[in-house]
Image: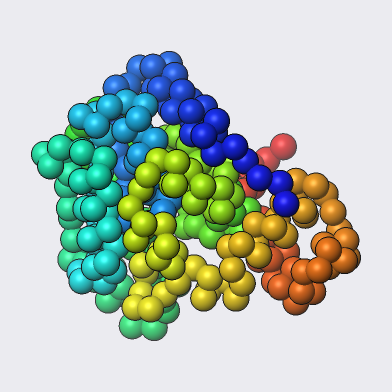
Amino acid sequence: MKTINPHRVTKNLIQFLRSSFQTAGFLRAVIAFSGGIDSSVSCALAVRALGKYNVYPLLLPYGILNDQGVADAKLVIQTLEIPKNNVSIINIQPLVDPIVALDPLMDNIRRGNVMARVRMILLYDHAKKHDALVVGTENKTEHLLGYFTRFGDEASDIEPIRNLYKTDVYELARVLRLPDQVITKAPTAGLWEGQTDEGEFGFSYKEADAILRMIVDEKKSIDEVVAKGYDHTTVGKVVKRMKENNFKHHLPIVPS
């Protein structure tokens, strides 16, 4: 499987952030910080590029849901030596619950979308407050699989890790010396109790990345991927999710 040089990629992304902010005329960054691997890596890169005094993490928990994520976010912030005055925590539950109450039949997916979009509102207001750009946290795996909420966690001004598969992001996390507990925990969007990314997918990120590299980057067919030893059902699930969510990359639809 194709691998990256994490030290070189880290160096390049730090320079990318630094030059992009300079070109845009901004000195400060805000980031929605969940305590997961993606937001931790994006935040660490921003600190390396802009300095710890110019990065403003925003923690947006829903009540006590995903308390571990909040604890992990605080640990990473401490590790990166970001000043406490730069860190904000807003409980989104009082904002989300009135919207959810409008429809008693709202399922977890819709509720999760509401949470993501409420976070986006607060994040961009935070950016306006600090005259900052929003640093995104989306990786290539999530992007290809459509595993994001449009106008929610998708919203950003700059995306440092979008060209990196999830497994690549872990490599950068080690180079950036992020805490082990952040690197080893199961990825979750924290949208409901017990939710995990891989539980929703029905396959692992490791499987998804290997399959996506072959299908997307190497232009191999499903049969060719299966011939490499990958389970046909798993390959089918990855391709199906990618195709079903491809519309997200082509909206809004405009007249020709």
Residue 192 in the image: above or below residue 149: below
In percent of width and height, residue 151 lies at 44, 50
Q: Residue 91's image quarter?
A: bottom left
Nearest to the observer: residue 183 or residue 74: 183
Give the residue furthest to the left.
85
Please indicate, yes or no, whether residue 256 appears anywhere in the rendered image. Answer: yes
Q: Does 14 sit left or right of 129 as displayed?
A: right
Colour theme: rainbow
What quarter of the picture does the C terminus occupy? top right
In percent of width and height, residue 117 lies at 36, 56
Q: Does 89 sit left or right of 230 as displayed?
A: left
The residue under the point 21% across, 38% down is 82
Q: Residue 245's image quarter?
A: bottom right
Please indicate, yes or no, whether residue 121 appears anywhere in the rendered image. Answer: no
Q: Does 136 sit left or right of 73 as displayed?
A: right
In percent of width and height, residue 159 lies at 47, 38
